[in-house]
Image (cartoon, rainbow, N blue to C red):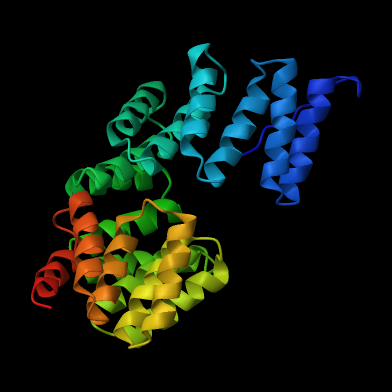
Amino acid sequence: MLISFSCDSTEDKKGRFLLKGNEKLKENDLNGAIDYYTEALKIDSEFNDALLNRAIVYERLNNLDLAIADYSKILEKGSNQDTLVYFQRGLAYLDNGEYYKGLNDAEQLLQMDDSNWKPYFLMGLVKEQLADLDGALEAFGKGLVLNPNNNDLLVNKATIHYYQKDYIDAENLLDQAEKNNPNEANIYNLRSMIAFEKENYQVAYDWVEKAITLNINEAYYYNNRGLYRLFLDDLEKGLDDINFSLKKNPKNPFAWRNKGIYYYMKGDKSLALKYLGDALKSDPEMDLAKTYYNQSLDL
């Protein structure tokens, strides 16, 4: 996704800073990459390639406000990269909890190009967060018409079926996604969530372990593993996973819920109510949160 800058002269400073930033990124030195992109922008504050690359790295570091600011600066003056930037900014808005702004970017993308799967993918993600599950299914379905073997669309459509407790359709979509790419970690994370709903806690744990093996950086997987460990009576390791997940993503209300469940299981009424209450403020209908909040009242 990163933009490479080619220049005739190696003396072109902003180009060399961009290339050095890209090299740092290949070495997984994200902060080093940002430093070089910032140096390029000191030379030319409207250098779109550096703005875009820096925004993408900010997003990977969960510095969403900074990412959104860089994307917006590109869009303010127009760019031949508009569709990419709208898509990336929409994802950043989504992760930042600014769902209606993400919806606006998805709608803008559809106006610009409705023959690409990405606007439908973004629209589906936003509709999911706005609790419009039928709208999300419709959006993901339209995307799959354009790109039938796209695993992002397949897994996210399966996720909506999971939310609707339609596990058969969810698992059929996951089977198709696994045939396309058996190394897609999200497949196994969702399989773990389905197994947990069926109270197959060890199976759920085994599936999420596979997901973590394939992607060690995803905070949600550790949060799920923490929850499964709680139900397997491995409370302290469960809390370690949940806290690790919160360090990577402190805004995840499902991690607050799981931490509340941990404190309920430990008999700590005050902390159980605090974390479960925080989760319910975010989503009053969150699975397990209301149940354990009410049970915590009786501790």
Residue 150 against residue 78 in the figure, above or below = below
Q: Tell which residue pokes out farthest to the top in this image.
A: 77
Residue 242's spot in the image, x, y percent?
40, 68
Residue 109 visible in the current orientation: yes
Q: In percent of the image, x 16 and y 71: which residue is there?
A: 292
Residue 143's spot in the image, x, y percent?
36, 43
Residue 14 against residue 198 in the figure, above or below = above
Q: Is residue 290 left or right of residue 59?
A: left
Q: Is residue 40 left or right of residue 104?
A: right
Residue 175 against residue 70 in the figure, above or below = below
Q: Is residue 195 left or right of residue 40?
A: left
Kindly indicate the quadrant of the structure image that contains residue 146.
top left
Residue 27's spot in the image, x, y percent?
76, 51
Q: In percent of the image, x 86 and y 19: which residue is there?
A: 12
Residue 95's spot in the image, x, y percent?
40, 43
Comparing 45 with 90, the one in front is 45
Q: Is residue 196 left or right of residue 180?
A: left
Q: In percent of the image, x 36 and y 67: which residue is there?
A: 190
Where, quadrant-wise, is the C terminus in this rendering? Answer: bottom left
Comparing 4 with 52, the one in front is 52
Kindly indicate the quadrant of the structure image that contains residue 54.
top right
Residue 90 against residue 262 in the figure, above or below = above
Kindly indicate the quadrant of the structure image that contains residue 116.
top left
Q: In percent of the image, x 57 and y 18: which residue is there?
A: 80
Where, quadrant-wise, is the N terminus in this rendering? Answer: top right
Residue 149 visible in the current orientation: no
**Number of numbered discs on residues:** 0
